[in-house]
């Protein structure tokens, strides 16, 4: 990763000058003066179209952004990523999620091991297992087929499988329902268990480390629930594990034959492509999972091979840098106009914020410039009736990524045209805005007098010039979903390179985990309350009092 600060970068200085020179030019004015703006600023890759014409850019600005990418050695870092170099330097690990979706037969040596062959071997086991469960040949303790799958995991061992199962629900096996339990809050597990018959339920304990407190607590509670009227001999029919930790899985009591392994070179938030995707394979079948991997692989090939000016993840990343570091935008809103993608922005939250939410460089120096933004959002049209007000007329500039799917997988008349109309209209409205003169003309035409008109003009004016990207696909399929996720993975990677950070560790989650362990012991009486600050002391005392009054 580039060690020097962006503040010392000549390319960044040129961008700062460019920002100052162009700040008065609106996107609306650019559309008026450049009729072929869509042709100039749109592209296709791996089944996705990116229209980035509604951004505050022109060819000069874009050229300067790509100069910055070159100066920060994005191409060299990209080669290291795909070659399996140990770019996660604080953990001395390679970052090889791209190997998980490479075609069968691809060889990649890592520490003397052909990881390509390892990946294919696990995929074959996932295929065989899923075929047994889906056909009904894999039966529960009383001989009935499995009907419910419960994935117990958190973070990357939860968000990915849940999001993908939701996104691909139109491909689901009719007999199978997937449930996802993540929170240590027992309301989560209890609500799921209440709906289940243990004899037809399969639990997947999904944890890279097999030590994560929430997952272990939920896994033990699920096992106790199962054993209330079942025997340990039946566990093998109902519990499987996905992990890198064979010893932990065995100690928990899961037969190693029921363990689907993956490797330390797969980061949790990049693990949906590994055996962590087992619930997806069970729900939609191996053929669709393979198509999902292939879609991601197509995006990988594009990212590796396309020149930077026609490289979708690079363009998306550099546009983000333009807003984050030159316009001071501190968040990005994700607006998928497809209900099956309702979990997508939550998934991207972990992908982006756990990767680039860092304040020191890969070599440990404090960053002197802003890094990862807040990622948030919800599906359209729902968001339009909740927070789009702020996006249109609030005081902050928040770039938006719209995601739209041209074809629907339902047959209800009218809905899809209404959905797409809203999506395109919002992008147009953010870009155009509505000037004070346009508001005046409208209100006057409605018959309002001059005083009433002037009182309303400031409220009804939209500043416009609010940038957005539009990502389009023909249909939401396993392949296009795979490409979409890989697109964002690579965007996050490129931005991490620009900021010079290690996007692949997550030390920021550790402190709270340690403190929670201590406080849990104090709450349950296993340890004497320590001296915390007065606030934490009081909160602990209240929780202890509430527990002892029961
Ligand atoms: O606490 C953060 C984290 O380490 C994530 O990065 C990871 O996806 C999640 O916890 C779950 O970890 P595991 O799969 O090891 O249970």
Image (cartoon, rainbow, N blue to C red):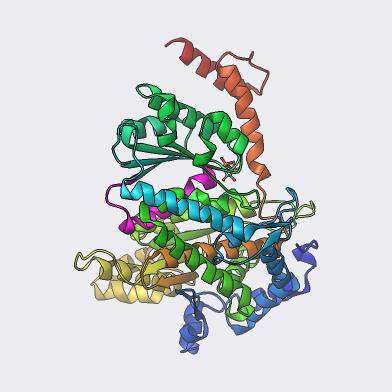
- Residue 324, picture quadrant: bottom right
Question: In percent of the image, x 48 and y 68: which residue is there?
Answer: 295
Q: Residue at the location (47% across, 35% down)?
A: 183
* Residue 331 picture quarter: bottom right
Q: Is 513 part of what is drawn in magenta?
A: no
Residue 346 visible in the picture: no
Quadrant in which the N terminus appears:
bottom right
* Quadrant showing the C terminus: top left
Q: Quadrant of residue 222?
A: top left
Q: Is residue 112 visible?
A: yes
Q: Is residue 449 shown above or below 215?
A: below
Q: Confirm whether the magenta stretch covers residue 158.
A: yes
As drawn, 166 above or below 471: above
- Is 20 placed above or below 158 here? below
What secondary structure predominates along the stretch shown in magenta? helix
Q: Which residues are magenta?
A: 153-177
Tell me: 395 left or right of 505: left
Q: Residue at x 68, y 63 (%)?
A: 81
- On the image, the x and y values in percent for residue 419 come to 30, 66
Residue 313 location (% of width, % of height): 57, 70
Q: Residue at x 45, y 30 (%)?
A: 185
The mark total stands at 0
Left or right of 392, for residue 349: right
């Amino acid at each position: 990763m580039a060690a020097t600060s962006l503040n010392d970068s000549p390319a960044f200085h040129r961008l700062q000058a460019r920002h100052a020179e162009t700040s008065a030019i609106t996107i609306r004015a650019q559309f008026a003066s450049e009729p072929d703006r869509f042709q100039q600023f749109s592209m296709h890759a791996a089944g996705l179209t990116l229209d980035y014409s509604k951004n505050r850019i022109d060819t000069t600005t874009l050229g300067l952004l790509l100069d910055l990418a070159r100066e920060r050695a994005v191409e060299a870092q990209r080669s290291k990523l795909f070659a399996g170099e140990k770019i996660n330097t604080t953990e001395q690990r390679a970052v090889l999620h791209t190997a998980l979706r490479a075609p069968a037969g691809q060889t990649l040596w890592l520490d003397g091991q052909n990881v390509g062959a390892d990946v294919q071997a696990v995929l074959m086991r996932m295929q065989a297992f899923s075929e047994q469960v889906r056909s009904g040949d894999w039966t529960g303790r009383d001989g009935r087929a499995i009907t419910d799958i419960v994935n117990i995991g958190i973070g990357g061992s939860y968000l990915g499988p849940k999001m993908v199962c939701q996104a691909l629900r139109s491909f689901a096996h009719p007999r199978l329902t997937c449930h996802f339990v993540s929170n240590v809050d027992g309301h989560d597990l209890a609500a799921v268990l209440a709906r289940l018959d243990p004899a037809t339920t399969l639990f997947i304990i999904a944890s890279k480390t097999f030590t994560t407190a929430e997952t272990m607590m939920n896994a033990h509670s699920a096992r106790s629930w199962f054993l209330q009227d079942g025997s340990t001999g039946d566990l093998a029919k109902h519990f499987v594990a996905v992990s890198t930790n064979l010893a932990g899985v065995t100690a928990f009591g899961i037969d190693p034959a029921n363990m689907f392994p993956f490797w330390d070179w797969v980061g949790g938030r990049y693990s949906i492509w590994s055996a962590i995707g087992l619930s997806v394979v069970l729900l939609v079948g191996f053929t669709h999972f393979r198509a999902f991997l292939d879609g991601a692989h197509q995006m990988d090939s594009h990212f590796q091979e396309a020149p930077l000016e026609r490289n979708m993840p690079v363009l998306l990343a550099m546009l983000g840098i333009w807003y984050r570091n030159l316009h001071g935008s501190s968040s990005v809103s994700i607006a998928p106009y497809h209900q099956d993608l309702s979990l997508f922005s939550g998934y991207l939250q972990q992908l982006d914020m756990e990767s680039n939410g860092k304040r020191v460089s890969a070599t440990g120096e404090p960053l002197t410039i802003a890094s990862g933004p807040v990622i948030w959002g919800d599906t359209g049209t729902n968001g339009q009736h909740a927070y789009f007000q702020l996006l249109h007329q609030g005081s902050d500039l928040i770039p938006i990524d719209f995601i739209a799917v041209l074809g629907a997988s339902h047959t209800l008349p009218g809905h899809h045209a209404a959905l797409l109309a809203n999506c395109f209209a919002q992008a147009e409205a953010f870009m155009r805005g509505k000037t004070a003169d346009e508001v005046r003309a409208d209100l006057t035409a409605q018959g309002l007098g001059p005083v009433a008109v002037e009182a309303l003009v400031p409220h009804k004016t939209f500043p416009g010039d609010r940038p957005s990207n539009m990502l389009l696909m023909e249909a939401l399929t396993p392949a296009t979903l795979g490409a979409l996720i890989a697109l964002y993975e690579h965007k996050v990677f490129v931005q991490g390179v620009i900021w010079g950070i290690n996007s692949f560790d997550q030390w920021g989650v550790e402190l709270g985990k340690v403190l929670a362990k201590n406080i849990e012991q104090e709450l349950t009486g296993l340890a004497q309350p320590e001296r915390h600050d007065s606030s934490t002391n009081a909160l602990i005392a209240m929780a202890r009092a509430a527990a002892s009054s029961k």
